[in-house]
Image (cartoon, helix red, strand yellow):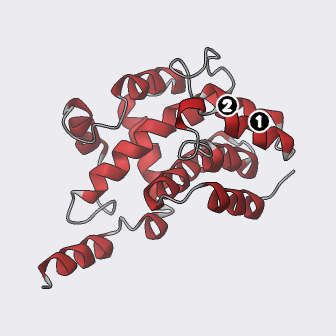
Amino acid sequence: MPTRSDAVALLEEWVDSEALRKHMYAVEAAVRHYARLMGEDEELWGLAGLLHDLDWEKHPDEHPHIGVARLRELGYPDEVVHAILTHGYPDRTDIAPETPLERVLYACDELSGLVYACCLVRPNGIDDLKPRSVAKKLKDKAFARGVHREAVHLGVELIGLPRAEHIQNVIDGLRTVGDVLEVRGEDMAARRRARRTP
């Protein structure tokens, strides 16, 4: 099975956008957190989270099919490849998420983007972020417009947890990579200082 190092090298080869890379690391962290909570294989699940948007930048019209084909060529496990395929449901694929990994990946994808966006507008970033703040922003359709609200709602249904608990789990996952995502309080303070400096 390819390792995480192999997956990171592949991500760096395919993805130039720093924002997209951060999103992929965020989803990986959230999915890994769920793997720990559920007693699943964290390394295996992490690969699905890390590589789920592999082809988004280069092949947006064919996403996730081009990436899935490449991952199959490279010998990634069927469980990982199929989860990545189902995360495009229902807009890009008609294959619904069914397995625990598929449900978790789907449920963490758009919500991770919303949580990240919430961090960017808070003085302390992710450090003191609470589910109620995220839920409030979820209702505000003008905030983080790229986040597909219907996918967030379907994700909550698929995960089978109360919405606040699922949001908290995603926050907890993202906190583990707060430095990589640059969403800690000190990161927010540094951004504010940079904006004030002429």
Considering only vertical position in the picture, is 45 above or below 191? above
Disc 1 on helix, strand or loop? Answer: helix
Question: Label 2 amino acid?
Answer: His
* Residue 166 percent across, percent down from the top left: 44, 36
The residue furthest bottom is 198
The answer to whether residue 111 is visible is yes
Disc 1 crowd, CA 10 A, few/some/many (<14, 14-19, 20+): few
Give 171 or 153, whichever is nearer the viewer.
153
Disc 2 crowd, CA 10 A, few/some/many (<14, 14-19, 20+): many
* Residue 85 percent across, percent down from the top left: 66, 29
Disc 2 on helix, strand or loop? Answer: helix
Give 46 or 85, whichever is nearer the viewer.
85
Q: Residue at x 19, y 33 (%)?
A: 140
Dot 1 corresponds to which residue?
A: 69
* Residue 25 percent across, percent down from the top left: 54, 56
Dot 2 corresponds to which residue?
A: 65
